[in-house]
Structure formats: C-alpha cells, structure tokens
Image (tube, coloured by chain):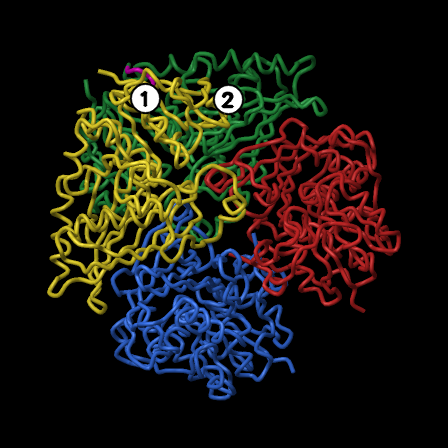
Chain colours: A green, B yellow, C blue, D red
C-alpha cells in the first residue's frame, strides 16, 4: 500500500525537510505541493536540494488543492490549520507541523498566542509515556515544537521516575532554520555567523507551556520550566541543556539506570556511553536523539543534555514517525538514525 | 544477492561517509572495519553519526582482517594501497579511495608524489566518455580525487564537443573535510571559520595531473590546467569555477546544447535551468552534481561552474557508484540525488 | 584640527564600519547620522557594536540634516548621491561609498546600471599609479567597489610593468556583508552557512567595468576581465584569485620583483613572504591587503591572490584613507594594518 | 612614560590577542616575544594578522629572555608560571593569563588541577566589589578565566545586592578559540562548524571553583554553581546564561535597578536597554560586556545573560585593563568598547 501525501507549505524549511523524508519513504507517494507567496513557482527554485521534484509547480494552499490525498501535512503559519483541516474531512490523516493543536489548555494558548484556541489533537511525540498507543489509527496529529521535542525527550524519564524536583532550568541553542525562511535582518548570514544571542528570555517563548504540559504529565504534578533559547551560528540542530535538583538519595547510578530503562526499546532515543556527549552535528538529517546524563554531586542537580536535528526529529521526522504509527506502518520507515557528518 | 564489504580506514572522513552510504545500500552488508591509530576503539567514539555501527570495534588494517569480503574499500594514506590489494587476491573487488592508482603516466605520479608509481586501475568516474563500460566487471577501481571529479564533470562536455580552447583556468573552493581528520593547526575551527585562503597555488596541487589526464582524453589533445584550490569555511562541498576560451563561432546556445546532450542520460549530472546557479549546500550528502554554464560575450570565455559534495560524489559516493557498475547492480543503488539543506 | 563628519546611511554595513573607524580617528568628530527606513531609531538597536554612539538617533537623509559638516560620507543606494552632493555645495568634502561616480565612461554606467550617468569623481584608490596625488585637496571622492579594490590592487603592478597579457581571469569569494543588510531569503544564515554559490557570472557583475577601467589604465591598453564572484559562508572578507598569461620571457623572479617594487612604499599593501598565502581572516577589521604571487611554469600564467576585508579596505577604510589624503592628514590616521584574528 | 612589555607564549590565541591590544596601547612598547615549540619562527607565520610584528622572531621562553622589561605577560600552559615569575624578581609587573594563581583555596586548586598550589595573586577583575583598589600598584596579577569573567560580571550585582538565592545555574557557549591553538581532532573546523556540544558537564570544568570564589565573595555566603560549558561554531565569544531564584519580594524593577547601579560607573559593563539582548558578535574584538536581565514571574528566577569576547575582555583585554590599573595609567587605555561587526 502506498499512501498519497500532500504538503501545504512546501517552500519553507519544514516543508522541504518533510519532502526530503517522504521521497525516501517506501510507503508514500508525494502528491500536491502548495504554497502561498510561492504558488506558481517551480520547487527547484525554492528547494534546490530536492532534485526529483525540481519541476513540480506549487499550487495555492486551498482545501481543493489538498483534497484527494490520504495524508495532508500542514506546514502553515500559526492560526491557519484549523480551517484547512475542517474542509479536508474526518477521514483524511491531517498532520499539523504548526502549533495550533499542541496545547491542551486553552488558557495557555491564549496567553502565548493571543488568539482563540483551535483545539487539541493527539500529540505526536510517541516516546512520551502512553503517547505511542494514543496515536494508532488517529486522523489528526499535532507535531510537537522543536524545543519541546528536545527538552521533553531529555527530561521525561527523570520526571516519570520521580527522581527530580519539579523545577527545571533549560538553556537551549538552536540552529537558524528553526527561525524559518522568511527574510529578517537579524537572521542574515552576516548577523548570525560568529555570534550567539538569546531571545524570548524570561518565560516568554511560546514553546514553554508545551514543555510544562509534557513534563507535568510525566511527573504527575506541575513542573515549572525556566527556558532560555539561544540562536547559534549553524543551520540545523538543537542542543538542550536541562537540569533539575535530584530528589534526596538519588545516585548517579540511579539516574543512569532510569534513562537506560526509559530508552531501552526506543528506536531513536540513545543514551550515549559514559564519557561521550551529544553533538548536534552527529544527528544532522537524522531522526536520532543523543542524550547524556550527569549528577553534579556539589549542586545536587541532575543534568540531561540532548541533541536533535530541529528539522528532522524536531519537525518533519517527528511528523513522519507519527504518521507511520497512525497508519499502522513500521514506525521507522523512512527515518534514519544516521547523521550526515561532518 | 548481498555483498559483504570491508572498509580499511573507517575512522576518517572518507571512511565515515562510505559507511553512511553503505548502511543505506540494499545490496551491501558492512563487514570488517579497520584503522591504524584508531584500531581497538569503538566506532561510536570516532563516527558518532553512525548509530547502527556504534559498537563495532576497529581492527588493525591488515590483509588478514580484510580477507573474506566481496568488496574491500581502501581509504588509506597514499602509498599503502598496493601492498594490501596484492594480498587480497584478484577475485576481490578492491576500490581505492586514495590516489595511488589514478594516474596513467608514471612520470606524473613521480613528479607530484615523489615515490614510485604503483600502477593504474580502471578509473571510477563513470560519466566520462567510455568510462562506464570500462568499469563493468572489473576487480580494481581507482576512485577519482574530489577536485578532479568536480572539474572533469564540469568541463568534459566542452572538450569532448570541441567548443573550447585547450587552456583551462580553474579556481575551486573546498570545504575543510577535504583536508582530512588529522589534526593540524591551520585546520582548526578557529582558523577556518571566517576565513578563506588558497593553497597549492601555481600548479603544485596533486590533483592537477589528474584533471589534465581526464580533460585531455575528452579533448583528444593536451589540455593545460591552471588550478587554484581554496579552503572555505564550511565542512563539505566543492564549488569549481572553470573557464576556457570558446572556439570561434561558438554561441551561448551551442554551449548549452552541448551540456544538455552530454548530461541527458546521466543520473547525477544536472544542468540547472537558466538563471539558477549551483550551490554546494544543495548537494550536501547527495551524489548529485549541479552545473551551470555561461558564455561571456566580452571575453569569449565559456564558464562552467559545478557544485558537489566532496565526500559524497567527490569520494565515497563515487566509490559506491563505481562499485555498483562493477558488480552489475543498478548504478544508483544507495545513492541519492537529494541534498540535506539548509 | 578636528573635522566634523556626517554619515548618510548609518544603519547599513558600510555605515557601521565607517563609524567604527571614525570613532578611532583622532582627527574626526562624528556628527549627524542619517537613515531612511531607520530614521528615528537609536543607533544602539541598529549597530549594537558601536557602544559610544548607542544613544544617537538617526535623522532622515536630507541635505539639511547633512549640512554644517566638513565631510559627508554617503552610503546610499545607487542613484541617490548626486542630488544630495549637489545640495551640500562645493566646499564640503563629499565621499560617496556607492557606485554613482566611479566609472569614467557613461556608456559603461548605462550598460551596467540602466540609468543616466551622474558623473565621475576622483577615484579613491590611492595605491593606483598617480591616484594618490590626484586625491590631494579634492572635495569629491568616489570610493571604489570592494571587488575592484581587491582585484585592482592585486593586478595593477603586473599590468603597470607590462609582464602580463591583457586578458585577466578572476574568481573572487566574498563574505556576505558585501551583499548588504537588506533582508533577502538567499542571504539568510540558514542559506549561506555551509554553502558556496556564484552569482553575476559571465560578465554581468557591475564591478566588472570598474576593474577593466583600472587595469586598462595601468596597462596602457584595454584589458579584458572575466570575473566570477562567489558568496562564501563568512561575514567579511574577499579572496580574489587573479591570473593572466605572462608575457614571453617573464620569470618567477621578475614577477616577484615587480610586486616588491610596486608595494615597497605602500602602507597597506603587503607582498607576503614566499610560501605564505593570503587569508581573509588575517585582515578582518584592518585596512591591510595581503598579496602573494606565483608563476605557473606549466601554463605560463601569473597568479596573484589578494585578501582584503571588504568592509574596511574594500569600503569604509578606503573611504577614510582617501579622506585623509584629501584633507592633508597623515594617510594612515585611524587605519590599522592589524587584523582581529582568529 | 612608555613601559616595555614582554609576552611569553606569543604564538597562541591569548598571546596574539594581547599583542593586538598592546600594539594599539599608547603607553606600551612591545619587547621580547617568546614561545616554546615556536621558538625561532617569525611571528608573521604564526600570527599573520599582526603585520607590524611580522618580522619578529620568537625566543625560547626563559627568564633570561624575559628579563629587562617593565611588564611580563605569561600566556603559558598551567603550572609553568611560578618558576618564571620567581626568576623575574619582585619589581617586574608579572601578569599571568593562566590559571595558576587565580584560586585562593589550595584545596580547590588541587582538586581541579591535580598538582600543588602555586599561590594566589591579586585577581584581575576590577569590576568586582573592592577589586579595583586592590590592583593599584601591585606587581603580580592573576587574570581571570574567560568563563568566570562572563559569569562573575553577570551575577555579582545580584549576589552583592542579596536579591538571589545562593544556587546559580549557568550554561555558557564559547567560541573555539577558548580551547586554544594546539591541534586536536575535535576542534577541527570540520567538526565544529554546524555543531554544538557540551563538555566538562556535571561540575568538572576547572573554571567552576573560580566562579564560586567570586560569587561567594559578592554574596557573603557560599554560592553553589551548576556550570555547563558548550562549544559553539564560532571563533570568539562567550554567551553566558545565568540564573538563580529571586529572593522573596524581589521585583523586575528591583533587579534592573540593582544592575543599573552596579554598572553605572563601569567603563566596560553595559546593561542593555530593555528589549535588547546581548550578542557575542557585537563585542568581537572589544573589551565590552553586554548584559541583560529578566525576572521570570512564573519560575521566580532572575536570569542574567552576558556576552563577552573570550579573548579580549575574557583574557587579553582583562589583562591590559588590570595592567593599566596596576601601573596607574588610565584604566581604559588601549581598550575599546567598539566591536568589529558583522
């Protein structure tokens, strides 16, 4: 069986990565591609790396153009997915790479996005406790944000096992593709090369409530998250440095054992051997998550560091992984654990 | 049929890229991996991007360790391949990623490498006139150098069609992985980021005679090559800017027609649409070659620019492509035209 | 004596670099700063590296705002300088960092810029034969383009000495700041990091006629220039690889002697010792030009490679150097030969 | 008065930056330069950016070579400074850029460096409470580490004012020059470009006790520091993200007021206007420290982010600043607040 998949928003970074993965997916045929300002243009101009699709022309993003597919991926600006999804009907698998349906609490949505909440869809992070089963057979999937993917996968084992206090401090560095392809002066190569800078400091980043939601669910209590994102001079990758106080009596061996157990059967989560640290360069283009843990004896903090490719596991790879589960395919179809390095 | 392949020199950049490709090749099983200073170490430490092989331990590079495979790839320092190949016997397909067997003229070898010539093996650049057929069924393959790959594929159509004078001027920029993984001060990140610098200027680069050999064969006369390589602040990629005087009466349309014809049936050579220029970032991790041509009316020069990934099409991808032909497999098995971008 | 200088176009890269240099110039007081879309904003937001001027607010670019200064630097889009200069009157030293007044031949201007020619001002490249004297006391200066600076300084000695044929082939790599600060998708960090790409290939780059003008003047005959610019993944720097056939009988020693003589008394031109090659990283933030020469015995080509900082010697430093001469100051005031490296 | 200064360890990154600054310092004449493996080589080969010193030849690092100077800077591997300093005598101002004399507690030294403690010298971070006066007239100065500079300047106002709890969590990103110029495989350009990776996680980094020492002194109680350094793909710069719980009742306005007051008279510490965040690119080559603060209302954490140039304020600039104080010169001589950007 080959499913036919459309991609709305094919000109952006998320759309491009999705198409790269779908072209290598044995069970998917790439159908209609759409854009907005890029409608009418050849994909070869917009995504020159996708040689097999170079002569495809983008249609305008409308429900009509997206109709007639088994799967529709939405890589649209926030706030536009609900209307499109509604018109596609309940039998089409709609996978939203945007934020619209990630949050369970409408108050969180309204506070961080300033608009009415569109709803909540099954959450496409299969590695979270109970999440994989909840994705089987569904027709709507909200793909997690890139930072919440890196952070939630780093910290859920600690919170699920109850070895850390419910106050997490997270500093993450992201490659520039996470900021999208719309041209802005502060994202110019001249500005970002040779420089690091934070943004959304002090609790203001929109991915914060999503992290709290995931970690609180794992902990069974409200977890607070101090999250500082920084922009790093590289195109791809997120390195998340996460820490929380260890609960009394937790040893370094216990921390390691918790992660070994939590990741044991996961195809993409890898606790590195002791002494080896995650590097974003090692997961470029792959769906793999590299993780390492430490217990700082002086401060009593458990430190967990994860590295992902923000566009692959953090966006398009996560979307394909969840699609595979929803469709009953092998979860790993089309998704590699092998990075392109150096 | 699955062939069993060994890789000698698995710890370097060429070896790592080769393993990345072989892991995705349906017809190959990865056998023994060897190294020299890295013998005894886990591959996971040396090539952290190759998750499926993380627990493999490198053997010392000896003919004994490499015996018992259908294919042996040699990614060794210059001068070491001949002895290993001899011990492997004539029935094993030996593919040398080093320079030892690329040059036909012993005098060229001795002049540029300062040691006795080891011999000449079938040359693994299938796109050159007559080269594909000459690779079928062979048991020894010399993989071209990265710069000669980029330059020969850019210029052979012009010389084969006789539209350019036999004096080529070439300036190429290479990513740092082309200089290998042995630590040297001038290759430190601190040195290369934010800087471009030439090397091997004035005819001294060892890849020069290989370019002359290829282009002269295409031209049917001796072609001279002024070649200046430069080191660019990026891990991968070669951008080769090549030019030569057009012969009298050659038009821009004629130049384009020559390239359209020469590349028409080639799976990896792509003449871009007019107005679009090659970018190394668009071919990262792929075996594709992006090419564009122009005729400068004022100077009468044909300008041909090519972009490749130096580690893929320029080294390991070229090796796999030639292996496929030698073994009678589909030439494109395990080799993508899709880049990882941005 | 301290002159008072205004900068029109203070928000861009050229304006920012100019202000950096003027702040370190003992004979200059920074006066009015203007912008267009940035008028009314604090300089601290736009040029966060210029701490001493952080609280300055940009005025709208008008002749009124620029009046009352001894020197006015214009870093404006092409076509806007003439009108401003006219209103400033003949006694103000007006230094145009744009292209409007660089070309002597109106036909060249019209062909490459598609608009009427505004005129020709004294050309601010003091190292060219006769140029220094021609700048003394002038009230109008056209600052050279960045590529013409790198290329003309590399090749004028060879043409002045008559050791090369009048057909030059040039391939240059530029940092991204050369493309300016206006946000465009192809200049995003995500696009440029890890990638090299050419542009303006085949004679179309607007800096070509300026190079021809300079080299022809040095040669005393028409020099043709095949020029290919490429965009490199670094914020600053130009590495220009220039070559031309040596005239009969020219030896490597003769080439070197020509350059030693031509550069002997120049404060910013440096022929590197044999065996050392120019690196853009070594001239970052400095007004220095690193040059090395070679004679390729096989091809008979003289190869000259230069490295500059495109924003310093290639733009703002060249402007200050010419200002110094015009005002009768020490030519090197405020201009360093020391780069910021690594 | 011009003092004569020698630099031991002139071939490394700290030594190169120091010489860059000393060349621009009106009160210093550059005397003897020494090295170890680089002894006998021209500085032009080793530090091609330092054109005025290109023909200087490095002497072997001995007390004899360093004798006869007013000031001697030591940029030597750990453990070598004490012997040299002793031979130089008590009247020479000896400024150690290494770690040997930074720590007050011998137990800290032995635990982190594994060798006997050499002693404690006046600490060259003038902005710390009481530190400036303690540097006047001294003959020995221990220059702080780069990370402790960024972190201590970020957090001392909060601890001095008593607005934060004594448990700090710090994640810092450093450019690669912080790791030095000795060639190591993991510092190759190929490895670092496009990748971020942590190191020294869990309390093991040698700069940790130095931070604790500084912050505890400011707080008047023992401050614990959870410090995670990461290696970023840029040559220079440190971005330090520091946080600690606010004490009860502390408001955002109070935090800001504390920093405004603490930095009010400091020439190099700059609290950015609200809404603007530090960027390492804005301080490249300068002695400036950009700082911004926030109070996360949800988590109750004070977040302080600082950006420095690790080689300037973090090493060589800090050394010159302290030298100026010790010698009774204007503290800002030779030290700019202006960065080279982009």
Residue that mark 2 sits on: B41
Left or right of B66 in this view: A44: left
Q: Where is residue C12 in the image (x, y as percent from the top left)?
A: 47, 63
Left or right of B51 in this view: B168: left
In the image, residue B235 above or below residue D109: below
Residue drawn at point x = 34 percent, y = 41 percent: B310
Do discs 1 and 2 belong to a common subunit? yes
Which badge, 1 or 2, comes first in the chain's sequence? 2
Hey, which residue is sitting farthest right in the picture? D90
Q: Position of residue B219 (x, y in %)?
A: 16, 52
In the image, residue C4 above or below residue C187: below
| Residue A15 in view of the camera | no
| Bounds of the magenta segment | A329-333
Residue drawn at point x = 86 percent, y = 50 percent: D134
Q: In which quarter of the view is residue A43 placed? A: top left
Tag 1 and tag 2, C-beta contact below 8 Å: no
Residue drawn at point x = 84 percent, y = 39 percent: D119
**Residue B305 or residue C69, whichever sits in front:** B305
Residue that mark 1 sits on: B88
Give me the chain letter of mark 1: B
Q: Where is residue C341 in the image (x, y as percent from the top left)?
A: 57, 54
Q: Is mark 2 on a helix, strand or loop?
A: loop
- Would you say residue C224 sits in the magenta stretch? no
Q: In which quarter of the view is residue C285 placed? A: bottom right
Left or right of C259 in this view: D262: right
Marks 1 and 2, how far apart at CA: 24 Å
């Amino acid at each position: 069986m080959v499913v036919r998949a459309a991609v709305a928003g094919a000109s952006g970074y998320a759309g491009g990565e999705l198409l790269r993965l779908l072209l290598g997916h044995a069970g998917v045929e790439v159908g209609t591609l759409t854009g907005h300002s890029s409608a009418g243009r050849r994909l070869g101009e917009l995504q020159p790396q996708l040689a097999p699709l170079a002569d495809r022309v983008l249609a305008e993003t409308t429900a009509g153009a997206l109709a007639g597919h088994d799967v529709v991926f939405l890589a649209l600006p926030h706030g536009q997915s609900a209307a499109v999804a509604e018109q596609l009907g309940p039998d089409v698998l709609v996978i939203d790479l945007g934020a619209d349906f990630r949050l369970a609490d409408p108050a969180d949505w309204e506070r961080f996005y300033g608009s009415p909440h569109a709803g909540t869809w099954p959450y496409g992070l299969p590695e979270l406790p109970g999440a994989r089963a909840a994705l089987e057979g569904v027709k709507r999937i909200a793909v997690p944000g890139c930072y919440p993917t890196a952070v939630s996968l780093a910290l859920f084992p600690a919170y699920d096992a109850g070895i850390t206090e419910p106050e997490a401090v997270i500093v993450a560095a992201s490659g520039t593709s996470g900021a999208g392809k719309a041209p802005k002066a502060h994202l110019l190569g001249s500005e970002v090369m040779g420089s690091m800078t934070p943004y959304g400091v002090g609790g203001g980043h929109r991915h914060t409530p999503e992290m709290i939601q995931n970690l609180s669910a794992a902990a069974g209590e409200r977890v607070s998250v101090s999250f500082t994102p920084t922009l790093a001079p590289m195109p791809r990758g997120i390195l998340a440095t996460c820490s929380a106080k260890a609960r009394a009596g937790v040893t370094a061996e216990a921390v390691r054992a918790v992660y070994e157990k939590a990741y044991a059967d996961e195809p993409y989560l890898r606790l590195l051997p002791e002494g080896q640290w995650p590097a974003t360069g090692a997961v470029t283009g792959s769906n793999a998550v590299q993780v390492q843990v430490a217990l700082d004896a002086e401060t009593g903090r458990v430190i967990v560091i994860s590295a992902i490719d923000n566009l692959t596991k953090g966006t398009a790879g996560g979307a394909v992984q969840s699609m595979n589960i929803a469709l009953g395919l092998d979860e790993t179809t089309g998704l590699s654990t092998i990075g392109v390095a150096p």
